[in-house]
Amino acid sequence: MRPLGIPPAQLTDEELLQELSSLHETRNDTLRHGSEDALTNHSRRTDELEREYLRRFPDREVNPARLRT
């Protein structure tokens, strides 16, 4: 597998949040109109960045109204 951008661990917190925001903004368009490869890469990069976010911020504030049981 080839790398998809800068490895998440090398991003600053600000860069990580910016990358995540950008991916979340483009998700629907990629899902609806991207090629299979584009969707696969988008999903993979989103997963990499979200895992890094959770690694850095394990005690992030969780809104009780957003919990699903």
Image (tube, helix red, strand yellow):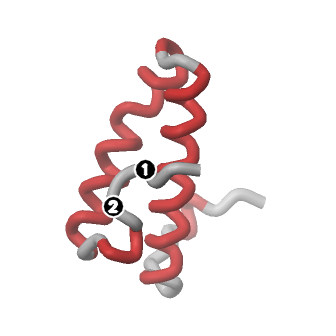
Q: Secondary structure at mark 2?
A: loop
- Give the residue furthest to the front: 2
Task: Give the numbered dot on residue 69.
Answer: none
User: Horizontally, is 25 left or right of 45 in the view?
Assistant: left
Determine crowd level at label 1: few under 14, some 14-19, many 20+ residues with C-alpha closer than 10 A.
Answer: few
Q: Which residue is mark 1?
A: 4
Q: Is residue 69 above or below residue 54?
A: above
Q: Is residue 62 above or below residue 19?
A: below
Nearest the eye: 68 or 39: 39
User: Horizontally, is 69 left or right of 47 in the view?
Assistant: right
The location of residue 46, given as percent across then percent down, is 49, 50
The location of residue 22, given as percent across then percent down, is 30, 44
Determine crowd level at label 2: few under 14, some 14-19, many 20+ residues with C-alpha closer than 10 A.
Answer: few
Please state, as top left, top right, bottom left or bottom right, where the C terminus lies in the image: bottom right
Nearest the eye: 27 or 62: 27
Q: Is residue 46 above or below residue 50?
A: above
Q: Residue at x 49, y 86 (%)?
A: 59
The location of residue 45, given as percent across then percent down, is 48, 50
The location of residue 29, given as percent across then percent down, is 42, 21
Q: Residue at x 52, y 60 (%)?
A: 48
Q: Residue at x 56, y 55 (%)?
A: 47
Q: Quadrant of residue 27?
A: top left
Q: Secondary structure at mark 1?
A: loop
Q: Is residue 47 above or below residue 26?
A: below
Q: Amino acid at mark 1?
A: Leu
Q: Quadrant of residue 56?
A: bottom left
Q: Residue at x 56, y 42 (%)?
A: 43
Task: Give the numbered dot on residue 6.
Answer: 2
In space, the residues marked 2 and 1 are separated at their CA atoms by: 7 Å
User: Horizontally, is 21 left or right of 69 in the view?
Assistant: left
